[in-house]
Structure formats: structure tokens, C-alpha cells
Image: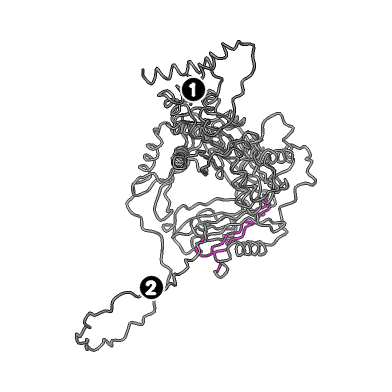
Amino acid sequence: MTDKDIEQKLKAAIERTAPDGLGRLLSDIDNRKGDIIMEKTAVSKKKNRWIGLVAALLAVALLGGAGGIYYGQNYTVATTVSLDVNPSIQLEVNRSEKVLTCTGLNDEGREILASMNGGADLKGSRLNVAVNAIVGAIVRAGYLDSLSSAILISVEDDNAARGERLQAELVAEVDGVLQTAANSAGVLSQYLTVDAGLNQQAQQNNISSGKAALVNQVLALNASLDFEKLAALSVEELRDLIKIGAPGMPIGRTEAARIAEEYAGTDVLDIITLYDVDPELDDPVPHYEVEIRLAREYDYTIHAFTGEVLSGEANITGRASSQTSPAPDLSEPAVTADDAFNKAADYCNATHPELSTYNIFDITVKYDRDDGHYDVEFWCDGCKFDYDVDGQTGDILREETDYRYTPPKTPDTTPPADTAPPDTTPKDTTPKDTTPKDTTPKDTTPVDTTPKDTTPAQPADIGVEAAKAAALKHAGITEGQVTYWEKAQKDYDNGRWEYEIDFTANGTEYDYEIDAATGAVLQYETEKVRTPAGQQGTPTTQPADIGEAAAKAAALARAGVSEADATWIKCQREYDDGRLEYEIEFIAGGTEYDITVLAADGAVTKYETERSKYNTGSSGGTQTGDIGADAAKAAALQHAGLTQSQVTRLKCERDYDDGRLVYEIEFKSGGWEYEYKIDAASGSLLEHDRDRDD
């Protein structure tokens, strides 16, 4: 009789005589003791004895014969694997690493498995194949879109060698899926032995044993927290709580979204306005970032433990919010720029005391009137530090740096054992060199300290067309499928020349970095283009474009302004939300106009006006004394001591800022980034900044 015959006979016998779950019962026989309690029925004693005899024979066949060995190897649960993000999914596998069951433990997990017949389609597949399919579905559902998101892999097995091996293999498998999807989510993993108490906690809260273990790590830091509430948090939130020592119970993503929508006044709308909620519990001020989309995007920052609205625009629909007070006027800070810098420097010294003796240099402090924060940047010990400082309170809201402290190694002071035999090598008796020393005076000419041009020499260059071809080949599309080339420019980054190639094709935005010398793909990202209706995709043909002149005419017509009366600030073509548009800004009659015009047909999709602080006069046209873009660029380059041939990524944009028309100029050279603001009327230097190009 073959193994297959045995399997079929055993399955038939089990279906006739045994209740569901016998396979799991048999797998646990070694761990369970006790009497079998049989329910009384009206069946005769003879029949009871016959059933008992069949059951006994079956047990002998299962536990002692070849069928028992086959059954134990193929239908006994050897390992339990769980995958947790916020969806929680559990897989039970046998010793051959074949999936026996696949179960969604919460609503999100069951939604992920819905396209796989509730997990039944994965039964019998190899574990790595099933995990690949599940993680791919989680990525497609958007659960790992956040840069700080994380997935937890837990392997539960009494065989430590097998469990730890599977843990390492599954981490590699999930890493591969994420890399293929160009996803930067973190991968956490743990190996667990079978624990009845942990399994009970997991079952009571509809989570996996792996997530229950993570919750217990939080409780070990703060026993006053509630297990059930912690179980409702995502893996990302639990991970961040552990990082910061679990000081309290966060409000959670759902509550943060509710507070933001109520504050914005969108909670009473019939349409879905919430776009994303991202926990940032490990920031200096723990918070949730909530993004709401209505006519445009609105960003809100909600304190993770108090629920206070830290930033965001109130009442965007015109309905009063129940928050106690209106949003503060952020146009003028209560904290000075010097105080903001001191707050950031003090925070840096407190969190990185080993840097207290180092000098701080290349300091930049800017105030953002939109969110009421100072952006403080400086360098220390060769690393850049970036802080957001609240302009009203001086609180540190965010720290960002690549600095990592490496403790100095403790020198080994143990004296070496002097066990070597005495050196008996004969001494060198060669006569010493008595040649007179060279007494010629040394050259004392001063060293030339003039700063040298550190712009790197350009090696072999494949050219921009070859770089575009390399990107298209990697993306697997033809140039005819490209609907919009956003960028194709050369830059020096990370010690080498490279091309930045950005384009849109078949409803997807592609961002590539191509090695300028070899044509190798250094980095790439893809993102589905979202149209205003919330759908994904763009036309597969080059979009129609009415041109800049026609777009300006459409904007002027909408404003009821003649071209002679307009002072142009900006006319820029951009690709946004799946369509090509012109962003147009101008001033006329003491009013600033901000208008968006569709490139396809000239339709106006955005129209905003505000009173201008800057009087352009009634004569219209261009501003009196406007030096022009070329003169503004020349002024900036002259101040930097550079020529245009020595710089890369030169940008020049005319803008209206604080009551005057200015030119904002940016460029890179010799490992530095330069930013200038030039008065458009006089050519005088208003602001300048030089920072390390990181």
C-alpha cells in the first residue's frame, strides 16, 4: 500500500469517526494528560464497544504504524508564524514548511486574505510563497506606505534551531518583497517558544502571539498601561513606545483622525476626506501627522498623548470647531531667532553630551509663517543637525540628524606576559654614515591659501539621452509611453556624477538616479499617480498643452485684468495629480492673484486673491527697476566668488516676499549648496545661506 493510499484511508476514517480538529489534538498528545470523557447516549453497549474497538485500532494505526508517521509529518502543526502591521495574520505549518492553515486574526487581516479565499488558497503552499503573497497584498493595501511603518514577523516553535532558521529566512523573504516594491518599511522579527499564557492573551484580544509578546514588552516598561488598548495599536506605534520608554497610553490613530477632522470641520461631510494618519511617537514631541484632502491637502499635527492640536488650519469648511480656542496667529513668532537657535543647541548638548566641546558652524535659522515653526540647521562634528522649534513656545518639535555616537574603545591595560627568550641576535656593527648634512636654507615662500575650486572633475559621461534610455530600459517601457518628462539633469551627489531622471508613464511616476559614468541604476522609486477623482492612472499619450502664453491669457481673462496692468511673479508648468497645469501668480491694482490653469484646455482649476502689501503702481507692466533674472544670478555668483561654469543645478525664480519682488536663486558647487534672495528692484543682497550638500 502506498503513502497516498494510506493518507486517503486515514482521511476517510477520520471523517467518519472523529470530530474536527483531531489533527491538532494528536499533535498535542505529548503535552496533554487526562481522561477522555465520553458523553452518554442511548446507543447500546455492544455498539459502544464496537466504536471503541474501531477507535482503538485507528489510534494504533495512527500512532504506531506507517500511517501515523505520515500523518505526524504532514498534518501536525510544527511552527506558527504571524505577520503583524495592523493587519494580523497567522499561519500554521508542518515540518515540511507547508501551510496547514492561514487565518486573519482581525478585520484588517481578514480583508487582506479576502482575495485569497480567506486564506484557503494558501493551504498546501510553501511557507515562503505564502508569506510573499501576504506581504505583497499588505503593501498594495497601503499599510506600509509611511516611511516609518514596520512589519513584525514572529516565529513560534519549540524547536529552537528550526524556529531561528525560519526567522532569518522569512526576514530575508520579506525584505525582498519590500525592495521589489521600492518600500522602505522596517522589518522586526522575533523567535518565541510555545507559551500557553501568551497564546491565551492573544486569543482574548484577537491578535497574534507575536504581537502579544510585543505588547508585553511595553507593559514591562510601564505596568500601568492597559493590555487591551495596547493590542489595538499598530506595530509601528508599539515599536515607538518601546523606544521612548512607554511614558503613557497614546490616543491612537483613530482618535487622532477624529480630533483632526473635528478641528478642520470635515467630520460632518458626507464625502471621505481623511487621507493618511502617520504616528511619530519617537519624535521629541510625540505626535500623529494627519493629512486631510478636500480641495487641497491640509496637514495636522496632534499630540500623541494629550490629543492637543499642535498645528493645522481650523474650520476649513466654515463650520466652527469644538476646540476651545481658534488657531493662534502664527505670522509673527513670540520666540526670537536667537532664542530658537539656543533652544536647539541646548537640546543637542543635552541629548548628545559628547558633542558639548565641539564647535557649531554653518548655522541657518528660518521662520515658517505657515506652520509657526523655526527651522534651525547647523553642523557639528561633521554631521548636520536639523530642528523644528515652536515659534510661540520654544519647544523642540523635531530633531533630524545622521549623527550616531560611537563610544570610544576602552584600551586594554593588561600587561603582556613577558615569556619571550632574551634576544641573542648580534648587534649591528656597521659604521655610522658620517656624510655632512645638507645645510641649504629651506624655501620659506608663504603657502598659497587661496581657496581652491573643489568642484569635482567630470569623468567619462554617457550623456543625458543615454541616461534616459537606461532609466526607460530598467522601467520596462518605451519612450513613446512617456506622457511627461519632469526632470533630466546632471548632478554631483555622494561623491560621484549622476543623472536625475524623472518621468511619468502609464499612470506611474518614475524617479531614477543613473550613474553618469557607467549608466548603472543607482536608485529608483515609483508611485502611482492619483487623479483628482481619487483614481489612479494617467493617459498613455502625451497630454495636450496650450502653452505658456495661452495659459497667461486664460488667467488674465479669469481675473479681468489686462496684461499691461499685470506684474508677473510666476508662470510655471507642473505635473500634479495626474494632469499638466500652469501655476500662475501676478499682481495688479494692489491685488495678488494665484491661479492654476489646465494645460490641456485652459480651464481655471484654482483662483485665489489677496490684498498686496506691495504697490506696483497704476502703470502696470513689469516693476520699475527690475534688474532681470540674469543680473540677479550674476549678483549671487559674484557674492559666492564663482562663475556659472563652476556651478550645477542653478535655479532662479522670481517671487513676491514680504512686500517686495525678489529673485530666489539656488545652485551647488564644490560640495556646498548656496541659496540667495536678491532684491528685484535694486539687485541688493537680502539673504544668503551656504550649507553642506548632503
Element at label 2: loop
Q: Is residue 390 above or below residue 573?
A: below
In magenta stretch: residue 364: yes
Residue stretch in magenta: 359-383
Q: Give left or right: position of 33 versus 590.
A: left
Q: Is residue 644 left or right of residue 195?
A: left
| Number of other residues with Cα within 10 Å of mark 1, as a class: few under 14, some 14 to 19, many 20 or more | some
Could you tell me the amino acid type at mark 1?
Ala
The location of residue 372, given as percent across then percent down, is 68, 53
Query: Alpha-carbon neighbours of circle 2 within 10 Å: few (<14), some, or many (≥20)?
Result: few
Residue 590 in view of the camera: no
Q: Nearer the viewer, mark 1 or mark 2?
A: 1
> Is 424 left, or right, of 77 in this rendering?
left
- Contact between marks 1 and 2 (CB within 8 A): the answer is no
N-terminal label among 1 and 2: 1
Q: Residue 519, can we see it?
A: yes
Give the image's coloring scheme.
one colour
Picture residue at 49% right of the left edge, 22% below the top: 59
The residue that mark 2 highlights is: 416
Q: Nearer the viewer, residue 420 or 361?
A: 420
**Residue 596 image position (x, y, % from top left):** 60, 38
Q: Position of residue 147 (x, y in %)?
A: 55, 44
The dot on residue 129 is none
Give the residue pinned by disc 1.
Answer: 59
